[in-house]
Amino acid sequence: MPNKHSPVLFPLVDYFGNLPDAIPEPQFEYKLPARQWSAEPVGLTPLEQASVGEPLVSIITLNWNGGGVLRDFLASFRRVSFKHAYEIILLDHGSSDGSLDIAKAFSDLPLRVIERGGNYSFSASNNFGARLARGKYLVFANNDLVMLHDCLAPMLSHLASEDVGVVGLKLLEPLRHDAERWNYITHHQGVLFQGNGVLAGTTKRYYVPMEQGERLSADLAATYHVPAVTGALMMCRARDFEALGGFNEGYFYGMEDVDLCLGMTVGLGKKVVCDTTAVALHNRSATRESKLQVSEREKMYNARIHAGNRSLYVSRFARQITRQILKSLVAGENFWREGPLRVGFVVTEATMATFAGDFFTAVELADSMRRLFGWETVFVPLRTFNLPGVDVLVVMRHDYPIQKVSEANPGLVTVAWARNRVDQWVTAPYFDAYQLIFCSSRKAVDYVKEHTGRHSVVLPIATNARRFRPLPPVSYHASDVTFTGSFWRDNREAIDLQDLSSLPYQFAMYGQGWGEHEKWRHNWRGAVPYTHMPEIYASAKIVLDDSHPVTREWNSLNSRVFDAIGCGRLVLTNCSGGVAELFPDLLPTFSTAEELQLLLQRYLNAPEEREALAAKLHAEVLAHHTYDNRAVTFREELARFVNGSLRFAIKIGVPNAEEREAWGDYHFALGIKRALERQGHFARIDILPDWDGGLTAGDDVNIVLRGLSQFQPQPTSINLMWLISHPDDVTLSECQRYDHVFVASVPYAERLAGRLGDRVSPLLQCTDPELFYPDPDSSLGVKDVVFVGNSRGQRREVVQYALDSGLDFDVYGGMWENMLPASRIKAKHIPNRELRRYYSTAKVVLNDHWPDMRSEGFVSNRIYDAAACGAVLVTDEMEACRALFGDAVSYYDSVESLHSTVEGLLQDAEVCRQRGIAFSEQIRREHTFDQRVAEILAQVRVLDGMC
C-alpha cells in the first residue's frame, strides 16, 4: 500500500504514483479509518489503592502569569465528576498577574498552592511537586487545559498493568473560525519521530519527536502503543517516576516529556500508551500568545535553550532511536514513525521511456517490495544526490558517486547490487561505502571476497511472474525465434552465430539500432515499450539470448532469460556459466555457430520436447527466480544487517585519496576495518574530506585515529578516540569531548585517567597477522640492515646514528632526498601488502620514536609489524618498550651503542633467528587487531549495550 502521509519529494521519482493528501480542514472530525488499530487490552490486575483519606492521584500543575487560562483549568474540575480521589498541586513561579488570587477562589477544590517565587524549569518544578505528592499516581498537567470529562479513569485503567509505564490522551486544540464560532482540531494522539532534525553546524540528520494530530488510520476510540506522549497531560505511577529519577533537569521547557517516556521504555522496559477515549481541551494558542508578550530576556523558547534541549536529547537517545526505527521499519512496523521504509534505487534514467535495463530491473524488485512488505520505493536518476526521506539506497551502477549523497534519513543503509562489471565495482573509489553488497552470481561473490575481503550475497536478476506469464500468442508478433535487445555498434555474438540460409526459420528482432544494420535490418520489427515484452515472448517458439561480455564473464543471466521463461517459452543462451549456477543441466546453452544451429534444429522440429522443457523451466522460475523471491532474500539480509551489525566510521587525517597509501594511519585503519568485519560489523574509512559527508548518516560509532586534524565528535554516534601517536598535539579538553579515549601507552593512559577517570583506558598498537608474518624472499636484494619509514622533512635519530657509525644499511621511505646519499635510498615506498617480505628478509630492522612518543611511552607500530614477520629489532632506549617486550627488542642510546648492538646481532645469526621466531609468536598471540577490536567492542557494549 502506498503511504499517503510521506509525499515523495523532487527530484526522486515514484513510478507507482505516491501522492500527498490534501491538507485536511482544521476541524475535529472522525473519518473512516484506512486500517483498524486494535485497542490495547486493559489488565485485570486491580489498581494500587490509596490509603484511607489520601488522594489516589496527584495532579501537578505549573503556573507563571497564566491567570487567564488557569481560571478555565480550575473551573473545569468543578464541572466534571471524577471517580477517583485526587489532589491538585499548583506550583506558582512568582506570578504577578493575580494568578494566586484566582487560585484562592477555588478553595472548594482539593487544591494546594505552593509559591516558589521564581520561574524554575519544567523538570525541576515538577520533580519538586512529585516529592510533595501524596497520590500513588502522578498526573502532570498544563495550566492551559480544560477537563471535558473524567479522563483520569480510563487513563488509570491502563496502569493496572505493570507493562504500562506512561499514559497519555487525545488533546483537542480550539481554533477560532469566526467571531461567534469555535471549532477544534486534534493536535495530540501520541508522539512519533521524523527524520528532519539537523545538527547545528552540520548536515547530519537525526529523528525529532513530533506530536501526531489527526490520523486517517485512527480508530474512533482506541489505545495506541506509542513511543511517547506529551507532557501537557501525562500519567504515571509515583514509584516508577521515582525509579527513573524524575524528569531530567538538563532540559528547560522542552523535550522533558519525551525523555521521560523513552527512559520508561529503555530503563524500566515499560510501554507508553495513548488512550483516545480520554479527551481534554488544550488551549495552546493562548499560551503561545502569552509567551510572545514577555521580554526577550525572559523568553523560555529562545534559540539557545532550544538548541540545548535538542543537544541533550540527541546525546541521550538519538542513536538508539535511529536503530530502533530502522529495525521496526524493516520488520514492517511503523511504531516509531509514520510511514513505511523508503527504498531508493539509483538507475541510469528514471523513466519508462528509457532503454536502460537497470531501471526495469529496479521497477520489478520495487513492485515486489511494495506489494509484499508495504515498503515505499522511489527511483533516483544517476546524477541525483539529494535523497529526501530515503532509508535504504540500492545503487545499480558502479559509477555512481555515492560519497555525494545528502538529506537521507538518519540510519541510511547503502546497498550495491553488482549485476555486471564486477571488476569495475570493486575498484570504484567508494566501494567500501556500501554496507550491503548483492551480486548476480556466485562467481561475482567470490571475486568480491578475493579482491576486497568483503562478504556479499547472491541476488540474481529474476522475473515478475505477475507481468511475465503464459499469454495467448499475438499474430503480428509471431515468430520461430525472437531476440529482444539493442544494437549499440558492438557485435552481438549470439545473433551473428545464426545461419538462416542453412536452417530457414522466421527470425524477429526488437530493440534500438537494428534498422540500419546491413545484415539484420530485414528481421527488425522496431523498438517496443517494456510493457509489450510479455506478448512478444508469448508469440515466439524460442527466445534467443545474447549475453553481453560485461554480464557473461560474471555468470550473470539477462532479464530476458527469466522473463521469456516466465512467459512459458524456451530460451537458448550463450551464458553457460550463469546456467551452470542457476539452471544446471536444464537450460540449453551454446558457444559456437554449430552448437546453436543444432539446438535450433532440434527444438524447432520437436514442439512437444520444446514445450515440455519450457514447462520444466517455467516451474523452476516460478519456484526460485521471481522478484518476490529476490525481495524476500533482500529483506532477510537487510534485517540481518540492521539487527546484528554496528556501523563504524574510522576517521583518519589523510588529506586526499591520492596520498592515503603512503600514510601509516590508513593501513592501521584497514587493520581495524578487517577485524571489525570479521566480527560481523560494517566499517568504513573516512579520509579528511569525507568526515562529515552524507555517508555518515548511518554511523553508530566513530573511531578517530588522532592525527594532525581535530574531529568534532557527533552526538548521534558513539565517539571513540584512539590516541596512537603525537600526544603533545591533543589537549585535555579535546579528550573530554569523546565518550572514551583509548591510548597506545600504558603510562600516558594512567596519567590521563587521573584527570578523566574511566573514560580513558590503554589500548596498545598491534599488527594484522594476515599481512605480517615470516615470508623471506632473497630475490629482493634486501641488505642485512634496513630502516623503513618517511623522514617527514626531519632527521631521524636512528638513521643519522647509523650514518655516523658507518653501518651498511638501506632506507625505504619518502622525503629522504636531501638528507641521505642517493645510494642509501632503496625505494620511496613499499606497498603495505609487500612489506612483510622486506622485514622478513632483513637480518636487523632499525627503529626509533619521535621525541614526544618516546617520552610518553608510545611504542612504534613498526615494532609490532616487523616483529610479527620474525625480524630482529633495534630501537632507541625506551622504558615503556622494555616494560612491554623486555629483551625481545635490542636497544641503543648512542652512536656507539647502535653500532656495537647491530654488529653483535649480525655475528650471531642463528640466535637472532630463534629470537625473531619467538618474538613473532608473542606478537601474533597477544598483539593483533582482532584482540584490540575485541576490547573496542567491549567498551561499545558498556556505552551502548547494542552489540
Image (cartoon, helix red, strand yellow):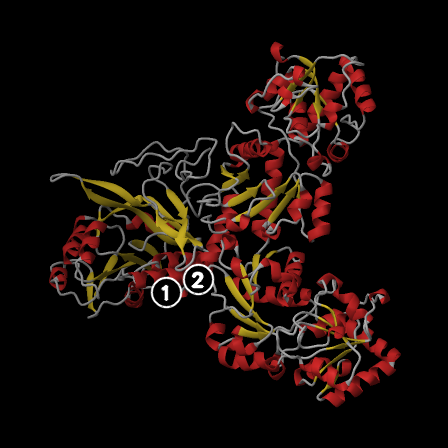
Q: Is residue 920 left or right of residue 52?
A: right
Which residue sits at x=56%, y=33%? 359
Does 896 appear above or below 218? below
Which of the two labelled residues, at mark 2 and mark 1, occupies the earlier sequence position?
1
**Residue behind mark 2:** 316
Q: Position of residue 756 (x, y in %)?
A: 49, 77
Instruction: Pick whichever, 523 or 134, lies toward us.
Output: 523
Q: Position of residue 766 (x, y in %)?
A: 68, 70
Q: Is mark 2 on a helix, strand or loop?
A: helix
Does 456 appear above or below 116? above
For the residue marked with disc 1, what is the amino acid? Answer: Asn
Q: Write down the quadrant of residue 909 in the picture.
A: bottom right
- Mark 2 vs mark 1, foreground winner is 2
Q: Is residue 112 visible?
A: yes
Q: Write down the quadrant of residue 222 in the picture.
A: top left
Which residue sits at x=30%, y=35%? 30
Q: Do the residues labelled 2 and 1 touch (CB within 8 Å)?
A: yes
**Residue behind mark 1:** 248
Q: Is mark 1 on a helix, strand or loop?
A: loop
